[in-house]
Amino acid sequence: METTSDLFHPDLSTLTFADVLLPIAIAKAYTYIVPEEMVPLLAFGHQVEVSFGKNKRYAGLVIHIHRNVPEAHKPKPILSIIDARPLITPPQLRLWQWMARYYCCTMGEVMNTAVPSNLKLASETRISLSPLYDHSFEGLSDKEFLVTEALSIQGELSLEEVRDILGQKTIYPVIHQLIEKRVIYLKEDIQAKYQPKTIACVRLQEPYASRPELLEEAFELTSRSIKQTEALMGFVQLSRQEPFVRKQALMDLSHAEHGVLKALEKKGIFEIFDQEVSRLPGYEDEGGQQSELSEAQQITLDEIRRQFEERKVVLLHGVTGSGKTRLYVELIQEVIARGGQALYLLPEIALTTQIIDRLKKVFGDKIAVYHSKLNNNERVEVWRAVLEGKPLILGPRSSMFLPFKKLDLIVVDEEHDASYKQQDPAPRYNGRDTAIYMGKVHEARVLLGTATPSLESYHNAKTNKYGLVELFERFGGLELPEVHIADLRNPPPPGVFCPCSAPTCSTS
């Protein structure tokens, strides 16, 4: 919808105004006039096109509609409504306001971090044709056709150039529709800072990977080399114990050198590849895939439920391998059965790839993943899905910015991890602490899970600010590793085992 920017009603007291939040580092939202034709259409959370300063235009969010005449400045009119669907929810705005106060930044900086790039159009934005576009022009309006045709010739356009092509000032609704139709995407030079941790692993090439019965032929190919045969036997042994075989573990077990594995690769038996893994030790061993709860798990689950009746935040202190993920799944299933939404927070992106397959087996298409590795179109899709009530969201700290409507449970896994702390840019927030306040805003319960609680969380649990539930039994009856404490100042007497690896220790 369009309106002229030069019309200005002389009697401001008869007009409707809207406070619009912009994705820039300014201290407050700015007040704009709502043109008469937009009054019945505009509501909280709508995205609108506004001018700011002399020549700049932004896509802002309406956060308040009122009849109070601004005294500090002469308001400008809203230029257009970009999308008739609300983009944010009232609880989401209250969380942003708290983050701006608590972490000493502006609301605009919070919005800039929270909202996907495709929803933050600005004068400096440049657009290009999407690689998904098939150059068919079907389903495009006349204005959309003109922009698309110009892009197919020039390759890239600024929004100012789009205004010249269309011969009008209000172009954001046209740009928005082209993004929705996957015709264009925003041109950005931003590179992801996240670099996943990978390790070298070994797997079988085809046809051996899909037909293990053919391994006998592979052993025949290695019959002239004892080292190659031992390496292949070592692989078979490790593959029965681990989901993927680490190259270094295979070399240690079979005493094979790099050349031996390379020779097997040339023979078409092995393939050496990089496997993305978690930086958190022990996470892969979490016993969350079991279909039945152990007795200790059931007792712990009942205690978590009881604690939630008294407190909104509960700390689950469970040793590695105790099956905390299995308990999360039970609680999430209960939330979804009630028609609510759940947020499963992880400290880093790499963990989502490890746990998503496990959760998909339980929740199917009820789960969505949100993180910085998604492209802009995918982020907008998840954003819309959450607004429409997607039951379960899995992701790192950035997923807290999504517009939840019926949030009932927040799980903060590995709550102690330093990756929950945002360093740059603003807001420089702690994901765990923000999740706790988010639970307060949504009246949702928050479960903090870890094998090594942070000092502040453990203190809050011990002083009854949080509930505390402990699970010190590993799933399947596995014993915990034995712990030895070594006093380096006084070496143990002869004959007593010392686990110290210090070269100065006399018993090492």
Image: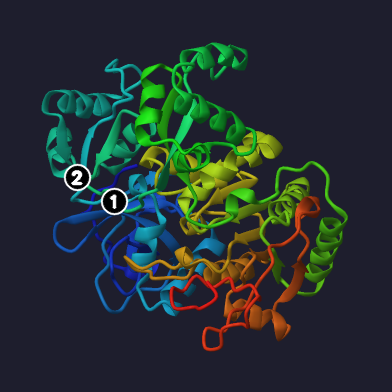
Against 293, is 90 above or below? below
Image point 55% across, 75% down: which residue?
A: 507
In the rendered image, residue 216, in percent from the top left (x then y), is placed at 58, 13
Amino acid type, residue under disc 2 in the picture: Lys
Image point 44% across, 68% down: which residue?
A: 421
**Closer to us: 199 or 173:** 199
Image quadrant containing the N terminus: top left
Crowding at mark 2 (Cα within 10 Å: few <14, some 14-19, many 20+): some
**Closer to us: 248 or 308:** 248
Q: Which residue is mark 2?
A: 169
Image point 22% across, 38% down: which residue?
A: 127
Marks 2 and 1, Cα distance to the nearest angstrom? 9 Å
- Tell me whether circle 2 and circle 1 mark residues in contact (CB < 8 Å): yes
Residue 102 lies left or right of residue 359; in this view the side is left
Image point 78% across, 61% down: which residue?
A: 473
Q: Which residue is mark 1?
A: 79
In the rendered image, residue 25, in percent from the top left (x then y), is placed at 28, 68
**Closer to us: 486 or 189:** 486
In the rendered image, residue 476, in percent from the top left (x then y), is placed at 79, 50
Against 142, is 334 above or below? below
Amino acid type, residue under disc 1 in the picture: Leu
Tell me the element at label 1. Answer: loop
**In this view, which residue lies farthest toward the bottom?**
489
Residue 138 in view in this figure: yes
Tell me the element at label 2. Answer: loop
